[in-house]
Amino acid sequence: MKFTQPKLPYAPDALMPVISPTTIEFHYGKHEKAYIDTLNKLIEGTEYADMALEDIIVKSDGKLFNNASQAWNHIFYFFQFSPDGIKEPSGALRKQIDEQFGSLDEFKKKFEEAGATLFGSGWVWLAADSDGKLFIQQSGNAGNPLTEGLQPIMTFDVWEHAYYLDYQNLRAEYLHRLWDIVDWDVIEMRYGR
């Protein structure tokens, strides 16, 4: 198999009380594993077999795109969290957030609103263009800013399986609580690429 599921950099209970071990078990342990397993089957013996995951996302469509992008999106999502990460951005990213959104609190409010108002399942993203300008984007289903030539910086998953076990239908509360575990050091590194 070409793609493998990376081990999370924290214990299954490390993100409590924001994300429970049960949600980690189902969301990362089962949903993410299924996307990776299906992706590996779909690319076997095709032109995509030797491509990087990001290239598959940009060049594919249909079932292959859905599984490739969901595999990538979930790793990107889970690896931005830490039980003891940096709680606020600094440097160039903080400056850009303040310039574009007025303040970190205003940015968070807009980001949460984008996630809460997305109809159906999908993702809310913070992405940057090649000049470092930031964009808050909603994407349905398996959408990813890579397909628009943007660099993803951060994402919150708004598929129900991301939050239903812990928050039931309270998507807005889930989105608000995620700030408690975002590791801004990771987000800053992604922005600096």
Image (cartoon, grey):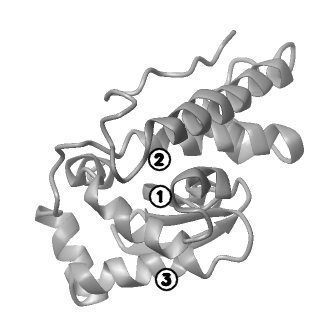
Residue 48 seen from this side: no
Under mark 1, the amino acid is Thr
Q: Residue furthest bottom?
A: 102
Quarter of the rendering containing residue 57: top right
Splitting the image into 4 quarters, where does residue 131 fall?
Answer: bottom left
Residue 99, picture quadrant: bottom left
Q: Is residue 127 visible?
A: yes
Q: From this view, report whether residue 104 is shown above or below residue 8.
A: below
Q: Percent x, y for residue 151? A: 46, 56
Q: Which residue is mark 1?
A: 155
Q: Nearer the N terminus, badge 3 or badge 2?
A: 2
The residue carrying mark 3 is 113
Q: Is residue 170 above or below residue 63?
A: below
Marks 2 and 1, how far apart at CA: 6 Å
Q: Residue at x 47, y 47 (%)?
A: 77
Instruction: List the single residue furthest toward the top.
Output: 1
Helix, strand or loop at mark 3: helix
Residue type at tag 3: Glu
Q: Are marks 2 and 1 in contact (CB under 8 Å)?
A: yes
- Left or right, 15 with reference to 72: left
Q: Are marks 3 and 2 in contact (CB under 8 Å)?
A: no
